[in-house]
Amino acid sequence: MKPITLRFINVHIFAYTGKMTMQIRVDPDICEGHGLCAIDAPGIFALGDDGIATAIDTPVSSEVEILVRAAAKGCPAAAIILSE
Ligand code: SF4
């Protein structure tokens, strides 16, 4: 029997504690730049130089979701769009 040589093996290990499914978006046409979102969920939302909020464009963990939901609920302009 001929031996088999494995030359390329890709192993990806993902280690996180929560499910990462929520995507966050701020509608720049609706955002009024209050900055409350950045206070409610620091590190997730930030105000840009133009005074409009942006959100990180990666899914957030379930541990952070509660902060994001609070920010979305507290946004006076309802500019935060959550999708799961
Ligand atoms: S709270 Fe709402 S309106 Fe205010 S900066 Fe954040 S996304 Fe924009």
Image (cartoon, helix red, strand yellow):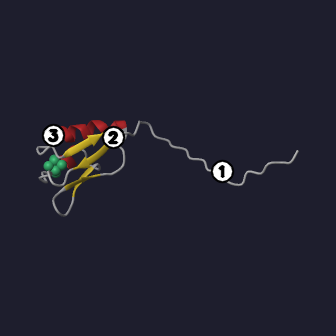
Q: Is residue 82 above or below residue 31?
A: above
Give the Cα distance between marks 1 and 3. Answer: 47 Å
Q: Report crowding for label 1: few under 14, some 14 to 19, many 20 or more residues within 10 A (C-alpha).
A: few
Any atom of ligand 1 within 8 Å of the CB at mark 3? yes
According to the image, label 3 marks what residue? 74
Assign a secondary structure to mark 3. Answer: helix
> In the rendering, at what x and y percent does residue 54 appear?
24, 54
N-terminal of the pair, mark 3 or mark 2, is: 2
* Residue at the image point whose x is 12% and y is 51% from the top: 34
User: Residue drawn 61% across and 50% down?
Assistant: 10
Figure quadrant of residue 51: bottom left
Residue 30 % position (x, y): 14, 51
The label nearer to you, 1 versus 3, is 1
Identity of the residue drawn at 17% across and 46% down? 79
Amino acid type, residue under disc 2 in the picture: Met
Tell me which corner region of the image, top left, top right, bottom left or bottom right, holds residue 52: bottom left
Question: Does dot 2 land on a helix, a strand or a loop?
Answer: loop
Residue 35 visible within the image: no
Graded by Cα atoms within 10 Å as few (under 14), some (14 to 19) or many (20 or more), the crowding at tag 3 reads some
Helix, strand or loop at label 1? It is loop
Task: Tell me if mark 2 has few (under 14), some (14-19) or many (20+) residues whose alpha carbon lies within 10 angstroms of its own.
Answer: some
Judged from this view, the residue extending furthest toward the bottom is 49
Q: Residue furthest right?
A: 1
Question: Disc 1 vs disc 3: Cβ atoms closer than 8 Å?
Answer: no
> Picture quarter containing residue 63?
top left
Q: Amino acid at mark 1?
A: Ile
**Image position, residue 13 (x, y; %):** 55, 44
Left or right: where 43 falls relative to 18: left
Q: Which mark is residue 22?
A: 2
3 or 2: mark nearer the eye: 2
Q: Which residue is mark 1?
A: 9
